Image (cartoon, rainbow, N blue to C red):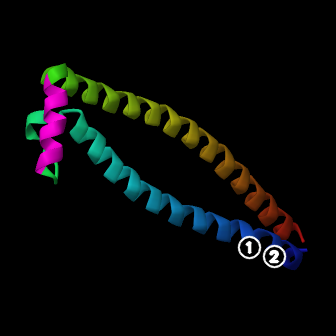
């Protein structure tokens, strides 16, 4: 019975390794995104520039019509909203991942017990 269970359990182990590699890549991407969002929390249009000076002049005219402080507040609020939404999503994903991990762990434990009994 032990020999028959091993082929069934091996894909679970491979899947788990693959998930860990993906999680590592996602964590690196998330850290970069978090850094951008954190910078946007203290956004100041006076410190921002465009590659094209003509485009920058056009944008500044529009921003000045609305008001620099109001524009800054809008950018900061948007960053806060994105952080809040991501935080909620991450909590849901962690709960789902925990449930899936727990289920896989229970399958592995059941397989190990069945193998020990054989």
Q: Quadrant of the N terminus?
A: bottom right
Percent of width and height locating residue 68:
14, 25
Q: Quadrant of the C terminus?
A: bottom right
Of 10 and 116, nearer the camera is 10
- Tell me: residue 36, above or below residue 61: below
Of 17 and 39, nearer the camera is 39
Of 20 and 80, nearer the camera is 80
Outermost left residue: 46
Spatial CA span between label 1 and label 2: 5 Å
Residue ID for mark 2: 7
Decide whether residue 11 is among the magenta residues.
Answer: no
- Tell me: residue 77, above or below residue 27: above
Tell me whether the residue at label 1 lies in contact with that at label 2, contact meaning CB atoms closer than 8 angstroms. yes
**Point 39% across, 33% down: residue:** 82
**Point 39% across, 50% down: residue:** 30
Residue 44 seen by the camera: no
**Point 77% across, 65% down: residue:** 112
Residue ID for mark 1: 10
**Point 50% across, 39% down: residue:** 90
Indicate left or right for 9 with 93 as reference: right
Percent of width and height locating residue 104:
71, 55
- Tell me: residue 25, above or below residue 102: below
Indicate left or right for 11 with 66 as reference: right
Decide whether residue 55 is among the magenta residues.
Answer: yes
- Tell me: residue 54, above or below residue 24: above
Give the crowd class for mark 1: few <14, some 14-19, many >=20 residues within 10 Å. Answer: few
Identify the magenta region.
53-64
Predominant secondary structure, magenta span: helix
Percent of width and height locating residue 14:
66, 71
Indicate left or right for 102 with 31 as reference: right
């Amino acid at each position: 019975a032990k020999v028959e269970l091993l082929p069934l359990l091996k894909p679970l182990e491979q899947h788990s390794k693959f998930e860990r590699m993906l999680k590592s890549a996602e964590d690196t991407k998330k850290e970069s995104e978090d850094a951008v969002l954190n910078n946007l929390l203290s956004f100041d249009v006076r410190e921002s520039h465009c590659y094209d000076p003509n485009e920058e002049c056009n944008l500044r005219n529009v921003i000045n019509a609305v008001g620099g402080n109001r524009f800054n507040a809008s950018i900061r609020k948007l960053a806060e909203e994105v952080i809040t939404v991501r935080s909620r999503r991450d909590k849901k994903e962690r709960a789902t991942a925990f449930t899936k991990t727990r289920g896989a762990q229970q399958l592995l434990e059941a397989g190990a017990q069945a193998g020990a009994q054989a």
